[in-house]
Amino acid sequence: MATDDTIRPGNSDGAHLVGITGAYQDNEYFIDKDEYLIGRAPDCDLVLNETTVSGKHAKISKVGDSYEITDLKSTNGTFVNGVKIDKKPLRTNEVIKIDVVEFKYVNPAEVPRTIVAKAPEFSDQQTVVRPQEPPLHAAPPPSEPTPMARPAGQLEHDRPQPKVQPAAFEKRGSLVGGLIVGLIIAFLFSYGGMFVAALVAAAQYGTISSVFSNVIDVFRTILAGVPFLHNHVPWMSVQWGVSDIITIIMLPLALLFGGLIMQSIARKNRFGTALLFSIFYVAIALVAQIAVLGFNFDLWLSIAPQVLPFGMDRILNLLTCCSYFFGVTFVISFIGSLIGRK
């Protein structure tokens, strides 16, 4: 129905309600009885499918050419222009509130026949006074109530349309910030874990002072060794001492926490964050490794674990080691990203 607040005279029997809120908005409900019942019960003249509306909530009675509204001892009350009432004569353009549903009462018989009157506008920002006392049986109304029957006079295109709810505020993360923090955490765990393992190994042999006196050389060794320690081959010939156990625990934890921290801060696609983290972690570790080796490519080839059968190309073996390093990094960091929030 096209909304037209201009009420034209000439119809003394056209008293009706115009929906203001929810699924009833802009619908017209003509008061075609001397006693017009409003409520949730199916036998009411105007059925409001709301859990907070009483079965027989209120009635509108004809008194001469005018009408009055009476609350039928409803649970949550009946209001006219924001004031709770028991019984009240109605005037055209007054707002009737049946708990959460609002209607505008319109009676053309009250408008002088020589004047075209314009009804006051009611905006969505109109503040309606609610009762002081809390409802006895309060319950949240359905988001989109549906009238049980289309009222008389409503055209096909006047059916209530769903109200568009504003989009919820979406929290956005920082991809760059998550990457930086995740890498810092991962390198602290991996290289820090290796340094702790070196201290434990030195303590077993009583040479712990040599670790601190040659701390630069120790870190050079760590930088050169960490990338290829992610391969399974270096662990096949170790004696499995305490330092070896520390190392093999700290390396996966570094990647796990790195992926978790990055995802928690970035809040992006988990696969994408794990992939980006792996690319930067592997690239930085390999660049640091070859830089410590003095960019000596032959030396780099020689320290790579032999993961391919002997006799195969050394460069292919090095590429396989790097691919293995990347694969392990991605899998573990992806598991971490699954733990992190999105």
Image (cartoon, helix red, strand yellow):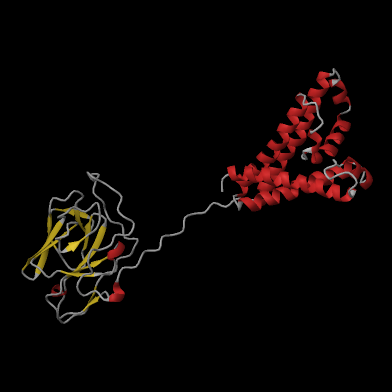
Residue 256 placement, left or right of 295: left
Question: Taking 140 as reference, is 186 above or below it?
Answer: above
Residue at left 17%, top 79%? 9
Figure quadrant of the N terminus: bottom left
Residue at left 22%, top 59%? 48
Q: Give the quadrant of residue 64.
A: bottom left
Residue 243 placement, left or right of 106: right
Q: Nearer the viewer, residue 111 or 188?
A: 188
Q: Position of residue 192 (x, y in %)?
A: 76, 33
Q: Position of residue 42 (x, y in %)?
A: 17, 59
Residue 263 placement, left or right of 305: left
Q: Position of residue 14 (x, y in %)?
A: 15, 74
Question: Taking 58 as reference, is 114 above or below it?
Answer: below
Q: Nearer the viewer, residue 134 or 298?
A: 298
Q: Position of residue 315 (x, y in %)?
A: 88, 50
Question: Taking 9 as reference, is 51 above or below it?
Answer: above
Residue at left 15%, top 61%? 44
Q: Give the quadrant of residue 37.
A: bottom left
Residue that protrudes farthest toward the top in the picture? 206
Please indicate, yes or no, whether residue 269 appears anywhere in the rendered image.
yes
Please indicate, yes or no, whether residue 1 appears anywhere in the rendered image.
no
Q: Nearer the viewer, residue 259 or 120?
A: 259
Q: Give the quadrant of residue 336.
A: top right
Question: Taking 327 as reference, is 5 above or below it?
Answer: below
Q: Nearer the viewer, residue 1 or 237?
A: 237
